[in-house]
Amino acid sequence: MSENGDTEEVPIIKIPNSKRIECLNKIFQDEFHSKPAFVVRVPGRVNIIGEHIDYCGYPVLPMALEQDILIAVGLTNDHRVYLRNSNCKYSSIDFEIKSFDDIDIKPDSNGKPFWYNYVLCGIKGALEYLNNKMKHGLQIVVDGNIPPASGLSSSSALVSAACLAFLHAQNVSLKKTDIADLCAKSERYIGTQGGGMDQAIAFLAEKYCAQYITWQPLKATAVALPEDAAFVVAHSLAEANKAATNDYNRRVIECRLAAKILVLSSGLALNEKILTLSRAQTLINKDLKEMIMLVNKYLPKTEYAKDEICKILNINEEELENTYLTPNTKHLTEFKLKQRALHVYGEALRVEEFRRTCANCVMNGKSADSNGMLNGDSKKNTLIVLGKLMSNSHDSLRNLYECSHDNLDRIVDLSVKMGVHCRLTGAGWGGCVVALCPKNIVNDYMEMLIDEYYVKHFNIEKSKARSYVFATTPNFGASIYL
Ligand code: ADP
Ligand code: NG1
Ligand code: MG
């Protein structure tokens, strides 16, 4: 196991020769009649386990994907950003940049963010960090191949790439952990109160290892995954833009309210207003299993009305709205506190068990034989334990957190029939599943999904269906190409 990232900056490396970079350069040349000064790359991610618990202060276990956002950048001497996208469905736009508080990030009339709002989030965060000191404007071409609105963190890759590009253009570099924190804060300008997992893995990822991410201070510890495990990502064909609805923020504030009530019900005096469920655990000083018992004891009801919560917290509705709720959750009247808290504490336990099982597998592997191979039975057991954790995670997300989708559940059911365990990854309500699949059946598994899910159920042509499923291994974090 290695720890990584606390002192390092984002690496600057020689630009690779690839068809994609060639195309990007050509688009840049056609648009701006010059060559880009540099290109930044920020990957998407798949979260293996630990869903909807980053904003509760609990560790998560993601890995970076090969799919990424590339941004080619040219420098200008004005204070403008000229924004283009290689995909013509994302329209071109130019902005004048005056100061960070002048950047107003507003969605369209249906409440859905414009694509360029994510770029503006990154620039706004960077400008705030720079105290509005800006030497150069930017010509930008974005090229992304992370399926958008699919739980693979295309949004954070875009925000983080924009922030990194803007800082680099002003000749400023930050430690990886600092820029990850800055990008997490920046993305909240879109309206969702994210926890920081996506930006953390975008910068702290390493090839060949997943990362166990812990908070305050942000730290990533490499986790070797079992050699005989493959991770397959499959798209459910349902997209969900997280900033277009209040589903995400509703969960965030339900967790905050649950945390507060747990602490007060435990008889503790409380100065802190906003609490995470993890902070509640620290204050109450119990282990995760005991926290689950406390949730059942102190949050017995399946739903809590706004006025009931005010009574418990001894505050009025105005204070509840202003202190605990977000602009898009202020009008809510019913809250599910027990179910959300049960998911969070259960999922936090599953992350710990997943990590421990991976570590034991590596240790046993070392003592097994000179090639580090485990004998057949222990190998099988490891995958059974990890698989069960994945399935339990999905069940909890579906039943307690209510963030699954019929399509996702269908893939999970098809997979289980073949003995493969999988779970929704990312925020949910659509998007992708991640499956833990024994390496020796990975092709059969992918073929089964292609035939049974995409072709049979959705009538999609086989060649197109193949583009929705891929096996993946842990990839590099962000870099700057010169
Ligand atoms: P995800 O799970 O992919 O992070 P989000 O709902 O958080 O989903 O963000 C998806 C949004 O990010 C898209 O609707 C789009 O506005 C933006 N986005 C993602 N990829 C790109 C891209 N390549 N170019 C432009 N915008 C993109
Ligand atoms: P996606 O699905 O990538 O938008 C979101 C949050 C994460 C985390 C997961 C659920 C943001 C930027 N990302 O991811 O912080 O809470 O959901 O585990 O808000
Ligand atoms: Mg996102």
Image (spheres, rainbow, N blue to C red):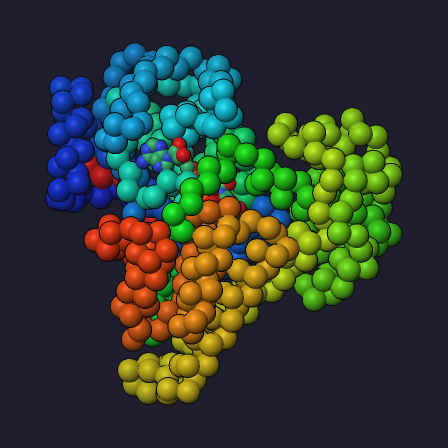
Q: Nearer the viewer, residue 254 or 421?
A: 421
> Seen in the image, is 347 located left or right of residue 9?
right
Q: Residue at x 70, y 34 (%)?
A: 332
Q: Residue at x 30, y 59 (%)?
A: 450
Q: Is residue 178 visible?
A: no
Q: Is residue 332 above or below residue 415?
A: above
**Of residues 371 and 150, which is closer to you in this image?**
150
**What residue sits 62% from the left and 30% below the top?**
328
Residue 240 lies, in percent from the top left, at: 46, 40
Question: Relative to residue 94, is residue 473 depicted above or below?
Answer: below
Could one spot residue 32 in this view of the protein?
Answer: yes
Q: Is residue 426 above or below residue 2?
A: above
Residue 412 appears at what percent x and percent y? 46, 62
Left or right of 287 in this view: 312: right
**In the image, residue 154 lies at what x, y percent?**
38, 41
Q: Residue at x 46, y 37 (%)?
A: 241
Q: Is residue 152 above or below residue 242?
A: below
Q: How many marks?
A: 0
